[in-house]
Amino acid sequence: MTDLPYDYAVIGGDLRQVYLVQELAKEENSTCHYALCQSPHVFSTKASSLKEAINASSCILCPIPLCRKGHLLNQSAYEKELSIDEILINLKEHQSFFGGCIPAYFKEAALKKGVYIVDFMEETSLSIFNTIATAEGAICEAIKKSPLNLWHSQCAVLGYGKCGCTLVQSLRGLSCYVYVAANPKEEQARGGLIADQVGNLADFERNVSQFDFIFNTIPSQVISNNLLKKMKSSVTILDIASAPGGVDFEAARQLGIHAFLCPGLPGKYSPLSSARGIKETVETLLNGGFQ
């Protein structure tokens, strides 16, 4: 790290970033913060601007995802929008930058400046750990938003990547009947090891009327108006895919079907655990780990 007043600047995001400041403070790291959703319960300097936070810190810790609505920083502290381009302009050689789902242009420009840059979502250990909070959050949302028990319910999980895998294991642990729908043969093969039944998305469409809960993890529209018309009126759809999700939400609204986009579940349901995972990843990478 460079010789700057603060070891870390924690910027934007949700409660994960608030807890991250608190976890860093336990080890006497000097920190500043900017645009947090609430004040941390430890001493940490609140920077007067985004520029000040970046210029004063050796390591910049930004949220997962880094931005929303294009190039706007993911934050809720200020009504005024903040551009991630302002972060990029102020980054300097030998600084370290961490964030999630970082746009390609940002990475390329930061690397040209000599910045050590890491996308949290490309770190396998953290992205897998993150699926635990996502799965638990999705199940909490399902329980809150449906009048039905999950126990012995008919559940479909669309996609069997990292999140889909953890979610299926969790649902099976709750005695749900679980159907995995995925087109890639590899995902079908892996899903078949634990799910009650596996098929492709065309098979899912033929069986869609049987499900009480549908969890989507595929970040492209797979639940269309025509598909929604074939579902039970009592179905609850939880979309945990990356933006823009995979559901035609306007069509669901018009049909009276309960469909919910559920972004940022780790920040909502288990921000402290998530913050600890982020901190461990940052420290390991800064110390030369995960080679």
Image (cartoon, rainbow, N blue to C red):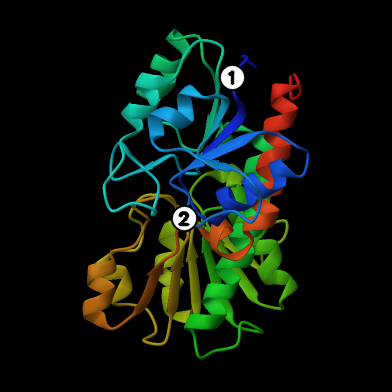
How many numbered markers are drawn? Answer: 2
Relative to 25, say whether 231 is above or below: below
Tell me, for residue 94, which label it has, or none.
Answer: none
- Residue drawn where x is 67% and y is 49% of the image: 22
Tell me, for residue 4, which label it has, or none.
Answer: 1
- Residue drawn where x is 70% and y is 23% of the image: 286
Mark before the other along the chain sequence, 2 or 1: 1
Q: Position of residue 8 (x, y in %)?
A: 60, 31
Left or right, 20 with respect to 39, comes to right
Residue type, mark 1 in image: Leu
Left or right, 220 with respect to 115, comes to left
Q: Which residue is mark 2?
A: 37
Q: What's the distance in space between the residues labelled 2 and 1, CA to CA?
A: 25 Å
Pick the residue in front: 39 or 90.
39
- Residue drawn where x is 39% and y is 53% of the image: 77
Pick the residue in front: 61 or 109.
61
Q: Is disc 2 in contact with disc 1, using a CB cutoff of under 8 Å?
A: no
The quadrant in which residue 278 appears is top right
Q: Characterize the local packing of mark 2: few (<14), some (14-19) or many (20 or more) Cα atoms within 10 angstroms.
A: some
Residue 189 in view: no
Q: Secondary structure at mark 2?
A: loop
Relative to 131, say whether 253 is above or below: below
